[in-house]
Image (tube, grey):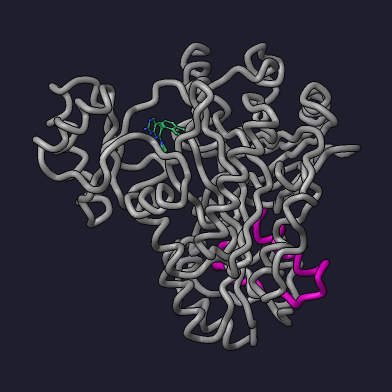
Amino acid sequence: MFQKILIANRGEIALRVLRACKELGIQTVVVHSTADADAMHVRLADESVCIGPPPSRDSYLNIHQIVAACEITGADAVHPGYGFLSENAKFADILAAHNITFIGPSGDHIRIMGDKIEAKRTAKRLGIPVVPGSDGAVTEEKEARRIAAEIGYPVIIKASAGGGGRGMKVARSEADLVVALQTARSEAGAAFGDDAVYIEKYLEKPRHIEVQVFGDGAGRGVHFGERDCSLQRRHQKVWEEAPSPALNAEERAHIGGVCARAIADLGYSGAGTIEFLYENGEFYFIEMNTRLQVEHPVTEAITGIDLVHEQIRVASGGGLSMRQEEIRFQGHAIECRINAEDPRTFTPSPGTITHFHTPGGLGIRVDSGVYSGYRIPPYYDSLIGKLIVHGRNRVECMMRLRRALDEFVVDGIKTTLPLFRDLVGNADIANGEYDIHWLEKYLAEED
Ligand code: MV4
C-alpha cells in the first residue's frame, strides 16, 4: 500500500480523496494555488504545497510543479480527482517515468478514450453497442453524403478531439450536410488542432445513461450499475440518479455485463465510466471517461462501496476487493449539484458564504469543501457542494430529498438550491419521465 498520496485537485473532490486516504491510514499531501490557501482540504491535509498563482494553467494544470511537489514531499502516488489533469495521458506517463503511481488507468488507455474515433472503434471491437455511423474520420463531401443517406437523417457530426458536447453539428437534410461538415471540421481544427470529424445517426430524445466500471489491469472487470444523468444544461449535469428510472433489472444486468467484459478484455485499470445514449430500449455508446466522476456518490450510496478506496487499492496492486456477484444494488440515490450560480440563468455568483448549514439525518450525505465565512474564489468551477440522498426506493428518496433541501442554508451568494426545490415538486421528475432536453425546455418555459 502507498505511504503517502498527493492529491492534485481542489474543492469537494480533494476533500473526498483526503477522507479515503485517512481511513486507509495513508499520509496526505495537497497542492494548492495562492487563491486556495484557506481551503478546507489544505487545512485537513497532513502537508500542503503552494504550487502557483490562481489561474489553473499555472497551478492545478502545472505538471512540473506537481511532480516537484511529489519529489519534495516523497509522495509515492497521485490522485488526480476529476477535471484538471485527471484525463491527461502525458501526466500519467510522466508520473510513471518518475516512479510515482498515477491513481488511474495507463496513459495509453487515457489516450485511446480521449480520441473519440479511436474510443468508438475500440468499444465496437469489444462488443459494446455503438451509434450507427461512419467507421472513422470523414473528410470528403461525397463520402459524408453516402454515409448519411445510408443511416438516414438527421445525422450529427462530431469532432474526434471533442467530447462532452464540444464540436458537434446536427444536419437534418442533405442540404445541411455540406455546411455542417465544413463548419465542424474548421471549428475542430481551430479549437483542438485536429480537424478529424465523424458522423453518427442523431438520436432525437435519448436519455444519458452511464455505466460505472472498474478494472484490475490484469484481465478482471466489474460493473457497479448505471447512473441516469439526463438532467443537464449546456452539457453541465445538474441532477444524477441511480438506478435509472428507465431501466429494469434485466437491462441493467445485460449492459453492465457487456461493459464489465469489455473492461476486462481491454486490460483496463481503475475506475471508468462508459457513457451511452438510451432510446427506445437500446443502448448506444458515445464516450468513455477514464476518471472518477463528480456523480460517483450515487453509485456508492446504492452499492455501499467506497469507490476511492477501490481506486487506491487497485492502483497499489491489491486488485479488486470484490467479485461481481458481491456487488448488490440497494434502494435509490439522487445527487443535486449545488453551484454558486443564479438558479435560472446559471451565471456564476462568487463571493463570501455568510452562513452554511447542511442537512443531516438518515440517508443524507453532503460532500463540500466550503464553510461559513468561506470566500469562493472566482477562478474555478462553481460547484460548492453535492447533496446525495439515499432511500429504500425512489419515492422515499424523493421525500427525503425534499426535506433535505428545506434544511439546506447557504447565505451570502446565489446557489442552484431553489431550482432543486422546484424540481422535487415537478410531476415529470416525480415520474422519472425526462430525457436530455427536458431541463433546458423546462427552464425556457419558466421565463
Ligand atoms: C449525441 C446526441 C444525439 N445523437 N449523439 C453531447 C455530449 C456528448 N458526450 C455527446 N452528446 C450528444 N451526442 C448522437 N448520435 C446528443 C448529444 C447531446 C447530449 C448527450 C448527453 C447529455 C446531454 C446532451 C445534450 C445535448 C446533446
Q: Quadrant of the N terminus?
A: bottom right
Above/below status of 410 relative to 1: above
Q: Residue at x 26, y 23 (%)?
A: 152
Residue 167 shown in magenta: no
Q: Image check: 195 left or right of 217?
A: left
Q: Is residue 418 visible?
A: no
Q: Image check: 426 left or right of 440?
A: right
Q: Quadrant of residue 102?
A: bottom right
Q: Is residue 88 visible?
A: yes
Residue 20 shown in magenta: yes
Q: Nearer the viewer, residue 256 or 106?
A: 256
Magenta part, dominant SS: helix
Q: Quadrant of residue 175?
A: top left
Residue 402, position as x, y percentages in the image: 78, 24
Q: Residue at x 56, y 62 (%)?
A: 35
Residue 168, position as x, y percentages in the image: 30, 37
